[in-house]
Image (spheres, rainbow, N blue to C red):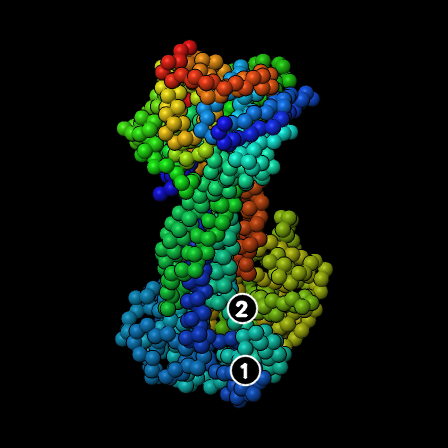
């Protein structure tokens, strides 16, 4: 080993505390980047392979009375490769527990094999006879149903028994989502069953289909073909044409992948930036300390570039080691993380790959980043004049800090505090860095506590403030509003209102969105609308109220005329936006029920009702064949399961953000101790105790902690706004304000991490040989 | 008359100290022959360190020329000066300036690694009398031992000129004499030209040539026809 490299090795050993600190930040950044981005790639790749293997549909056409002649017609459409008709409907799954309400989606499949959306068999056989059923895996697992078991399903008002002949996964239900409104997977209470096509046609009645799956020749043409079909197929009973990207499960998957990608870019950026600044600071201090040695090296004949490379190797070693360990452990963690996603996403061929190119990219990126930061730190080497460097450096010019001019104030400050204030104001860059680290830590804490809070608040705001619906009853079809009286003969309701809930395509110029529009009574007691400023909004007699996420998606404002296209009778009507309302869950439009039915349906009809009741409406719904009930309690249960998992990831975020503040304060304090040995030694000679010296350092950092927290709170607000915007989807809108409690918790957590870092440095103060420092004269 | 290895012609060096121009060197001219042991003698502030830095390629003059083996070094670029120091010059400093994280031998090897015709480091360590202290770190050595390591480090590169800036300045009398003896031994053994600057006039007794300086000027250049061994010097 070259002697200069040996010196480097010993330099690393001598600064091991700071070295490990900066290494751990680089490691964390690269670890988070690799773990999350690999998980995103794993998910995306696995999903793509799964879609290819099962020939996942490009376009979903929904309607009623669809005949096989339409399927033949579609084959002649330009760009269409394959078409397949099927029957899909939701119905009740009968269990032994009469109190239990379980829904299943019955889907017709070919006796042997589908052309599109093929099933991926997990066990049993694919071939179906009339009495056989294939169950989706998530449902079978949740309800512990095995091959050979018998299940009972209500079809067309009659109970049918089926023998479970197979258990399969479906690329259409990677994420088990019943509808846009029921976005949380609840595999115990919602499942999918696959039945033989011809038999289902027979027992479902009519013989016609209600869905067609399409494959197109070119992926790029999906949008064009879907739009063309949407305009041309109305007379064939087609109501909705859904592109692959809007398919519920696929959409959720893509949103999750985008979220992961976003996180994989932003978190490591914060960590690497701080690591870079820290590395540059560390190296500039090392170079400053090594001034005389650098002079000697230059005098001996080492070139500037040789000396620069010597110090840059320090940075490069951090980059390579941090990058390598980070990317390797990140890759391993991505395996766990991807399997964790299996809890939510059912992808049978989910494989965890080692992406060697990503490891290489991570190491190269980390290396380049560290070398660039290191170069910034060591560039001072060039300025060192060998002749000048042999002489001891002149002490820094001590000048008054501005507080000293306020005589009365300065005169009353104790000596030890004067040192603290002078030190902070003379080493502004260092303290700004510590302050910035505390600020980012606090900001990330504010964001994390908000995230924990917002998930809960979204639910509570939606179900306790926005709507107060205990039971949402859906009818099997549109019915006369006198059906309410029929319901009341079975249920003792505190309050009941009929409603219409139907999907429409809403367009504003070139922007359009398919959403459910809800028709409500003008004096509805179930909804309380507020605009984004919090002011109450009354349901107008005419026009429409739209949720803020819909307004954003359509780029629509109050007063705009938006086009509402009904899927029921192909009626297009321009409606004025009368208000934009705040809605945390879901994306909807709201109209007066009379106005809505007058325009799109027959007067006095409804397709559901909202009920608040002491009765167990779910249980009682069994007596009424035509209704399907969703209770708020079941939604809450599913939601709580969902939030338990988000809380865990938020816990990691708290640890990561605290770790950042901890490491930076710890290493910068260590750096201070090393540089100020002579000063501390003099203070010791004067009679200062170790604790008094430690307290000086604590005071310096506490001042920066207070300033950092004060700066961190608005940073946290900015992060919250960014996260809110980035994570707002069709399913949820994150626009909760940050609560005082969250700010206080963040501040306390930040202080705890900073104090821990301080306590760690006390060990260093305690071990310092002050007398040795006074004697030392070796470069 | 031996071969001239170093020649300085009318060297001037000005420093700007605020609005005042300080003339550190004024028309300094002299010659040094190959293998000579030269002592530059002068009080503190006389410009001897500035002169040493200029002939060592660590600094450049405001005016004047320095020739090494007939080649002009005052016209050299920074890079050329670096290679001049690397291949031709060995420095010994008053405060040793060793690398604290390298052992004595490693400090010498650090220099030896720079040159192709370096002297074997074990041999140099023995020559300065530190063969048995090779694995000690500077902090485990006395000032005299550290200065010997510094000499070994300078000599190991096998330079043509050894420039020593007050090498005994930080040492007691006994140790100082030992160091001077080592320098003379090296001068004789390896044939290097040694230029030593000092404010201690007694040391000039061992020199082949004495250059006296005062207030930036060379006041006298004299040959010492009867140099005495270092052991006989006293101060």
Mark 1 or mark 2, whichever is nearer to me:
1
Up/down of A543 relative to A534, above or below: below
Residue B147 locus on image (x, y percent) = 39, 24
Total label count?
Answer: 2
Quarter holding the C terminus of chain A is top left
**Residue B68: where, in percent of width, then height?**
53, 34
Q: Quadrant location of the N terminus of chain A? A: top left
- The furthest residue to the front: B1
Rendered image: mark on residue A553: none
Which chain is home to disc 1?
Answer: A
Inter-mark Cα distance, 1 to 2: 19 Å
**Residue shown at the point (38%, 42%) measured from the top left:** A2
Does dot 1 land on a helix, a strand or a loop?
strand
User: Where does residue B60 sit, x and y in percent of width and height?
Assistant: 59, 31
Q: For the point 63% across and 23% down, which residue is it?
A: B27
Residue beneath the point at 43% across and 60% down: A357
Which residue corresponds to the image point at 56% horizontal and 29% vertical from the top-left?
B7
- Place residue B212 in its image quadrant: top right
The residue labelled by disc 2 is A246
């Amino acid at each position: 080993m070259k002697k200069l490299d040996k010196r480097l090795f010993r330099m690393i050993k001598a600064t091991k505390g700071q070295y490990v600190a900066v290494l751990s930040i680089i490691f964390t950044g690269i670890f988070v980047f690799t773990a999350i981005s690999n998980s995103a790639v794993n998910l995306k790749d696995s999903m793509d392979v799964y879609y290819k293997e099962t020939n996942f549909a490009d376009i979903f056409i929904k309607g009623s009375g669809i005949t096989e002649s339409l399927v033949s017609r579609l084959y002649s459409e330009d760009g269409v490769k394959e078409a397949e008709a099927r029957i899909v409907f939701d119905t009740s799954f009968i269990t032994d527990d009469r109190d239990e309400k379980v829904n299943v989606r019955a889907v017709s499949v070919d006796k042997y094999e589908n052309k599109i959306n093929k099933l991926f068999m997990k066990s049993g056989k694919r071939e179906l006879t009339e009495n056989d059923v294939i169950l989706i895996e998530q449902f079978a697992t949740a309800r512990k149903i095995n091959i050979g078991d018998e299940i009972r399903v209500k079809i067309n008002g009659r109970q049918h028994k089926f023998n479970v002949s197979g258990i399969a996964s479906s690329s259409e239900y990677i994420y088990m989502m019943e509808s846009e409104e029921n976005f949380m997977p609840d595999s115990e209470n919602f499942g999918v069953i696959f039945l033989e096509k011809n038999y289902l046609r027979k027992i479902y009645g009519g013989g016609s289909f209600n869905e067609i799956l399409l494959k197109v020749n070119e992926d790029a043409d999906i949008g064009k073909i879907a739009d063309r079909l949407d305009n041309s197929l109305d007379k064939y009973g087609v109501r909705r044409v859904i592109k692959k990207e809007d398919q519920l499960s696929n959409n959720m998957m893509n949103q999750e992948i985008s979220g992961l990608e976003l996180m994989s870019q932003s978190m490591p950026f914060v960590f690497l930036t701080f690591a870079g600044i820290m590395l540059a600071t560390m190296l500039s201090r090392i170079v400053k300390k090594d001034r005389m040695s650098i002079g000697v090296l230059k005098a001996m004949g080492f070139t500037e570039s040789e000396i620069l490379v010597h110090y840059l190797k320090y940075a490069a070693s951090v980059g390579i080691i941090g990058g390598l360990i980070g990317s390797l452990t990140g890759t391993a963690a991505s395996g766990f993380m991807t399997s964790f996603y299996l809890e939510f996403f059912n992808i049978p061929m989910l494989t965890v790959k080692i992406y060697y190119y990503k490891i290489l990219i991570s190491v190269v990126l980390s290396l380049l980043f560290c070398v660039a930061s290191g170069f910034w730190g060591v560039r001072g080497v060039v300025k060192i004049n060998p002749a000048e460097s042999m002489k001891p450096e002149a002490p820094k010019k001590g000048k008054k800090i501005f507080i000293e001019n306020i005589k009365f104030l300065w005169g009353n400050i104790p000596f030890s505090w004067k040192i603290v204030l002078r030190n902070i104001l003379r080493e502004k860059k260092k303290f700004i860095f510590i302050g910035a680290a505390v600020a980012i830590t606090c900001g990330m804490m504010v964001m994390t506590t908000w995230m924990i809070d917002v998930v809960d608040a979204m639910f509570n705001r939606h179900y306790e403030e926005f709507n107060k619906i205990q039971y949402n009853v859906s009818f099997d079809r549109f019915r006369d509003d006198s059906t309410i009286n029929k319901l009341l003969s079975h249920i003792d309701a505190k309050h009941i209102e009929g409603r219409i809930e139907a999907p429409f395509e809403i367009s504003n110029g070139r922007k359009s969105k398919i959403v459910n529009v809800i028709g409500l009574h003008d004096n509805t007691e179930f909804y309380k609308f507020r605009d984004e400023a919090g002011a109450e909004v009354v349901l107008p007699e005419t026009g429409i109220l739209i949720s803020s996420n819909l307004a954003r998606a359509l780029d629509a404002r109050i007063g705009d005329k938006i086009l509402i296209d009904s899927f029921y009778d192909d009626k297009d009507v321009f409606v004025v936006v009368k208000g934009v309302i705040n809605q945390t869950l879901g994306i909807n439009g709201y109209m007066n029920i009379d106005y809505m039915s007058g325009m799109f349906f027959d007067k006095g009809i409804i397709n559901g009702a909202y009920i608040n009741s002491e009765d167990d409406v779910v249980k009682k719904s069994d007596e009424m064949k035509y209704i399907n009930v969703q209770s708020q309690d079941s939604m809450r249960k599913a939601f709580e399961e969902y939030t338990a998992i988000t809380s865990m990831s938020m816990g990691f975020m708290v640890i990561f953000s605290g770790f950042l503040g901890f490491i930076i304060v710890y290493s910068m304090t260590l750096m201070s101790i090393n540089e100020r040995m002579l000063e501390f030694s003099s203070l010791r000679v004067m009679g200062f105790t170790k604790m008094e010296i430690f307290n000086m350092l604590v005071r310096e950092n506490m001042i920066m902690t207070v300033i950092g927290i004060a700066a961190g709170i608005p940073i946290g607000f900015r992060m919250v706004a960014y996260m809110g915007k980035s994570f707002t989807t069709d399913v949820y809108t994150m626009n909760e304000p940050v609560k005082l409690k969250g700010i206080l918790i963040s501040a306390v957590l930040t202080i705890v991490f900073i104090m821990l870092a301080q306590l760690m440095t006390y060990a260093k103060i305690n071990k310092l040989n002050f007398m040795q420092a006074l004697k030392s004269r070796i470069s | 008359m031996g071969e001239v290895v170093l020649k300085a012609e009318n060297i001037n060096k000005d420093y700007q100290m605020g609005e005042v121009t300080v003339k550190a060197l004024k028309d300094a001219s002299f010659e040094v022959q190959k293998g000579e042991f030269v002592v530059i003698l002068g009080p503190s502030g006389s410009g001897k360190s500035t002169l040493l830095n200029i002939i060592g390629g660590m600094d450049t003059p405001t005016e004047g020329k320095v020739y090494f083996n007939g080649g002009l070094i005052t016209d050299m670029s920074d890079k050329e000066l670096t290679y001049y120091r690397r291949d031709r010059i060995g420095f010994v400093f008053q405060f040793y300036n060793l690398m604290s994280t390298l052992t004595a031998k490693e400090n010498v090897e650090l220099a030896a690694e720079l040159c192709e015709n370096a002297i074997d480091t074990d041999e140099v360590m023995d020559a300065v009398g530190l063969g048995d202290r090779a694995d000690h770190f500077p902090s485990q050595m006395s000032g005299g031992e550290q200065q010997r390591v510094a000499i070994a480090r300078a000599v190991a590169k096998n330079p043509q000129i050894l420039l020593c800036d007050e090498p005994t300045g930080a040492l007691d009398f006994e140790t100082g004499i030992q160091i001077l003896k080592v320098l003379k031994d090296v001068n004789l053994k390896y044939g290097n030209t040694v230029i030593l600057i000092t404010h201690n006039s007694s040391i000039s007794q061992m020199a082949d040539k004495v250059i006296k300086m005062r207030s930036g000027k060379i006041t006298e250049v004299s040959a010492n026809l009867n140099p005495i061994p270092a052991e006989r010097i006293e101060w």
